[in-house]
Image (cartoon, rainbow, N blue to C red):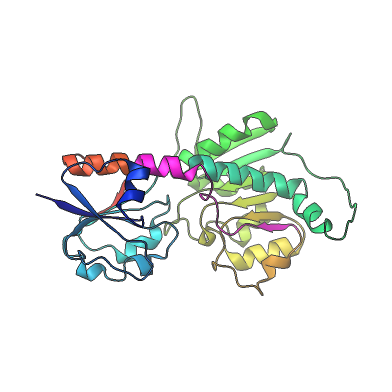
Amino acid sequence: MARRIWLPYPDLAAAQAALGPLPDPLVADFFRADGTWPDSIGEVELLVAPYMFPPATVMARVGEMTSLRVVQLLSAGFDNYLPYLPDGVRLCNAAGVHDASTAELAVSLALANNRHLDTYARNMPSGTWGNDFSTSLADRRVLIVGYGRIGAAIEQRLAGFEVASLTRVARRARSGEIEVHPIEELDGLLAHADVVFLITPLTPQTEHLIGAAQLAALPDGALLVNVARGRVVDTDALVAATASGRIRASLDVTDPEPLPPEHPLWTTPGVLISPHVGGQSTAFYPRMQKLVREQLARFAAGEPLENVVAG
């Protein structure tokens, strides 16, 4: 008996070009959150949510999806989908898909801010030769807050930069070859960090994890790189801390998001902002396609799904 799935492609040809033939007994309809809804809304069992669309748009008619069993995301973050998830429906994220791309951007944001590449880019239209002395990643003390797969990928990419030290923080302590500190020790570690990478998931425990007290604990000249979620940082506290010139920040995520054009962070010296593009690179497609292909095979065979985060 056929089992209905929805895929974020324009048609079957595009889906098969990306994923290959669909395993029996799966039959696909195509949904790209563009206002057009397939007629099979009451039959769909597995929905692959279109990437970077608001969950309120993707899940606007979830009450009519009476056969829905699985929502597969193409993002690592999933907190914004939880309010829309019906009872009994499993939510799977895209853990692993964005590791390389997000880690690459995180290190790029640190390098660009430290080496004033944003300033030099702004000098180009006027032809201003404004060279100055900048900060290297070499000899800096690095702290990674949220030591999961992306945190480990950031560490791998820092291996050639000759950092002075690297300290890892996660929800729970881990011992062994790699020491990981528990989140309860974060405040004491911040005073010894020149560069802080935030890549923790957003949970009730991590909302405003970095506030005025934590920013005050950082040494003068420290750089905060946020590639997690905007609400992990208290925005008002960040505005005050960066406006003082004491610390700097590179942000791929903000609160609110998108950041309004009049927001002071746009014009604060020492703040570099990218518009939530951590996963948006050519590295996304092959990893996403592999995940979806394998996940569909598991679903068709009745095998346990990977990356189940809720339900």
Residue span colored magenta: 270-291
Residue at 40% of width from left, 62% of height from top?
80
Q: Quadrant of residue 230?
A: bottom right
Is 169 part of what is drawn in magenta?
no
Is 289 part of what is drawn in magenta?
yes
Whole-percent x, y for residue 36 in the image: 32, 69
Q: Is residue 66 left or right of residue 229?
A: left
Extreme residue in the right direction: 129
**Nearest the eye: 218 or 14:** 14
Q: Is residue 253 left or right of residue 134?
A: left
Whole-percent x, y for residue 189 in the image: 60, 44
Residue at 49% of width from left, 49% of height from top?
200
Say if 113 sits above or below 23 in the image: below
Q: Quadrant of residue 285?
A: top left
Q: Is residue 220 left or right of residue 128?
A: left
Residue at 32% of width from left, 45% of height from top?
16
Q: Quadrant of the C terminus?
A: bottom left
Residue at 54% of width from left, 68% of height from top?
256
Say if 200 sits above or below 258 in the image: above
Q: Quadrant of residue 39?
A: bottom left
Can the viewer see residue 96? no
**Nearest the eye: 251 or 240:** 251
Extreme residue in the front direction: 13
Say if 143 sits above or below 229 in the image: above
Can the viewer see residue 50? yes
